[in-house]
Image (cartoon, rainbow, N blue to C red):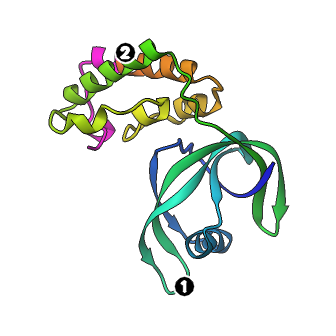
Amino acid sequence: MTSLPLFPLNLVLLPYELLPLHIFEPRYKIMVRDHIEEDKPFGIILNENNVVCTKGCRVKVQKVYKKYSNGEYDILVKGVEQFKVINTRMEGETVIGEINYVPLNSDGNEQLCKNIQELYLQVLIKVGISNSLEMHMGKKLSYEFLQGFELPLIVKKKLILMNSENKRLSLIKDIFMNILESDIIQKKNMPSA
C-alpha cells in the first residue's frame, strides 16, 4: 500500500488521457509544485457529492503553460497509472489516499483487440482523420484507443471501475460501433491527431 495525495475533481481521468488544469487552491498549488520540483506523485480522482470514487489515476505534469507569481499554475497533465483506493485520510486540507496501483493489463482477447483496432481506424476516417494513420496502429490497451475522445462522465466512470481488460475492450467496441452507425459527428468529440 502506498500513500498518494489526491486531487478530487468532478471528472474521471483515464490512463493516457490529457487534461489541462488551472491550479489556484493553496493545497493543490503545493501538490503541483512538489510534483514539478521534487517528482512527488499525485492522483486525480472523481469526487461525486463529496464522496471519492474507489479508483483514480496517478498523473504526470506534461507541460507547465504558465507559473504565476502567486504560485498558481496552468498545466497539462497525463493519466499514467490507475490505482484503487483502500482508505483516505486528511492531512491538513489535503486528501491522502492509501492506494494500491492497478496494472494496466495487456491480457485482453487478441481477436477482440484486432477488431477494435479496425473499428478505431474506421472511426478516425469517419471523423476526417485519414493521413498519418500509422501512428494510430500500435495501440493495444483499452485506454489507448480512447485518447482524444470526449466521453460522458458515466461512461468514463464505468471504464475506470472495470477490473477486466476484456470488459473495457467490449465497451469500447460498442462505443465505436455506435459512432460508426451514427449519422452525426460533432467536431468537438473528434480525437486529435
Q: Along the horizontal axis of the image, is 114 left or right of 34?
A: left
Q: Would you call the spot at circle 2 few (<14 residues within 10 Å), some (14-19), or many (20 or more)?
A: few
Q: Provide residue 66's location: percent of width, then percent of height.
A: 42, 75
Range of residues picked out in magenta: 177-193
Q: Which residue is mark 2?
A: 115
Q: Would you call the spot at circle 1 few (<14 residues within 10 Å), some (14-19), or many (20 or more)?
A: few
| Most foreground residue, 34 or 153 | 34
Name the residue at 54% across, 45% down.
Answer: 13
Q: Provide residue 14's location: percent of width, then percent of height.
A: 53, 41
Q: Picture quarter containing residue 180?
A: top left
Q: Any magenta on residue 56?
A: no
Q: Provide residue 2's location: percent of width, then percent of height.
A: 78, 53
Could you tell me the amino acid type at mark 2? Asn
| Most foreground residue, 185 or 144 | 144
Q: What number is the disc on residue 84?
A: none
For the C terminus, give its image quadrant: top left
Mark 2: secondary structure? helix
Which comes sooner in the sequence, label 2 or label 1?
1
Name the residue at 49% across, 16% down.
Answer: 170
| Most foreground residue, 14 or 90 | 14
Q: Provide residue 168's location: percent of width, then percent of height.
A: 54, 23
Q: Which residue is mark 1?
A: 70
Name the residue at 77% across, 67% down.
Answer: 93
| Most foreground residue, 188 or 108 | 108
Could you tell me the amino acid type at mark 1? Asn
Q: Any magenta on residue 192?
A: yes
Residue located farthest toward the left when viewing the structure as drawn:
131
Q: Along the horizontal axis of the image, is 108 left or right of 51?
A: left
